[in-house]
Amino acid sequence: MPHVVFIAPRFLENTNRYVRAFAALDGVTLSVVSADPAEAIPAAIRPYIGGHFGVANCLDGTQLTRAVRAIASSVGRVDRLAGALEQLQMPMAEVRDALEIEGLSTAIARNFRDKDRMKEVLRARGVPVARSTLARSRDEIVAFIEQVGFPVIVKPQAGLGSRATFRVETPDDLAAIASPTKTSPIQVEEFVRAREHTCETVTIRGTPVWRSGTRYFPSPLEVLEAPWIQYCVLLPREADDATWTRFHPTNGDALSALFGDQARTAAGTALTHMEWFLREDGTALVNEVGVRPPGVQIMPLMSIGHGTDMIADWCRLIALDQFTPKPRTMAAGSAFFRGQGAGSRIASVTGIERAIEQAGDSLVEMRTPKVGQPRAEGYEGEGFAIIKHATTEGAKLALRALIENIQIRYH
Ligand SMILES: Nc1ncnc2c1ncn2[C@@H]1O[C@H](COP(=O)(O)OP(=O)(O)OP(=O)(O)O)[C@@H](O)[C@H]1O
Ligand SMILES: [Mg+2]
């Protein structure tokens, strides 16, 4: 009976979905590590949890190791250590290394978390990526720009959520960014003009068994640069659309390069989220890959598109190395609502009724922004909606109805 330890930093809505799905698996013992006390575990699932261990900080590898060691000695040998957040990837790998738990080691986790190393590994295997460098001084940025020209993108070496990611177009832009140092280098990349897509892949011990993909409208960078843009993610109806399928061999090469000599082990049983660029001339470049369930509502989009519950499927995959591919039957999309103007709170929300009316039967779920709600920090905005449609075109129209009608203003 496999014993899974799931890291649930707080027992919040989304995390609880994973806890519930692991708990529901027949023949699996579930323990959880959390910064929340055991009392915060939803009552309905408490009986299914073998062990709970509290830590002050789930992102601290040393604390996690102590917790997982304690679980191992009280509940039993740990077979899998899982967590859904990007920030957990390195600390979890530290625990696996320390306690000899099968799965992603720190050496391989770094291929996914360190953007410079990721690009080096991909390049070495002939996977197309943007030219890049890890700059340790302003001079190194200047030297890189002399090679590739303006514009360039600068971002943190271990970024997430597009934080501190900027387009540098002129020497003035360059002067405005903080100088990197030996101890805090920054990732600098050639600017790729392209459409941005994702490729979600299920691999079992390194072999891809299922793929899905979405498109971002517009790119996360544009979303970042224009905080008022309400953006969408679209999962098309056609699973065989050549835009995505042509990328599959590159996706396979990239994953095999990144999983490296751990591909055929439990580390290679994963759902990965790859972001990739498609240029006007038809060429594709890999941007980055996460070994975790994707954000921006891509999990529910995949569930709707394939008539399944992707969270339950992911938990089964991780715990038992099992996955049943399901065919695409629907197009799906998510729209993110973001406000206009200055200010820190929502002053008004308009157009909701009209958006709902126009989206019609396509609307699956809407988290409506509320007046008085504080301005959101990340790019996920103050609210979102999820839609489905029998056709890709219908899904696009429904998304458009949402973002064109709903208007949020801050004050
Ligand atoms: N080389 C590049 N050329 C053009 N745009 C880029 C490049 N690198 C990054 N971007 C833009 O910046 C966004 C964020 O970059 P990236 O995905 O590497 O960082 P991240 O912080 O891991 O993002 P997230 O967690 O939001 O996926 C990309 O989605 C893309 O829009
Ligand atoms: Mg990204």
Image (spheres, rainbow, N blue to C red):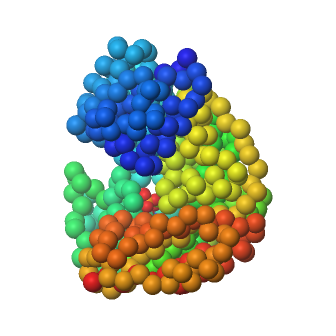
Q: Nearer the viewer, residue 171 or 63?
A: 63
- In the rendered image, residue 312, in percent from the top left (x then y), is placed at 58, 40
Q: Is residue 386 above or below residue 272?
A: below
Residue 338 is at least partly visible in this image: yes
**Figure check: 299 above or below 215:** above
Left or right of 303: which side holds 242? right
Instruction: Answer with left or right where residue 366 lies relative to residue 278.
Output: left
Q: Position of residue 86 (x, y in %)?
A: 41, 47
Please name the residue shown 70% across and 64% down the image.
331
In this view, the residue in front, 266 or 232, is 232
Q: Residue at x 27, y 24 (%)?
A: 66
In the rendered structure, the answer to whether residue 110 lies left or right of residue 296 reads left
Q: Nearer the viewer, residue 40 or 192?
A: 40
**In this view of the protein, can residue 190 be seen by the observer?**
no
Kindly indicate the quadrant of the structure image that contains residue 156: bottom left
| Quadrant that contains the N terminus | top right
From the image, which quarter does the C terminus lie in? bottom left
Q: Quadrant of residue 84?
A: top left
Ligand 1's image quarter is: bottom left
Please state the horizontal and vertical placement of residue 214, each as a whole percent of the image: 62, 62
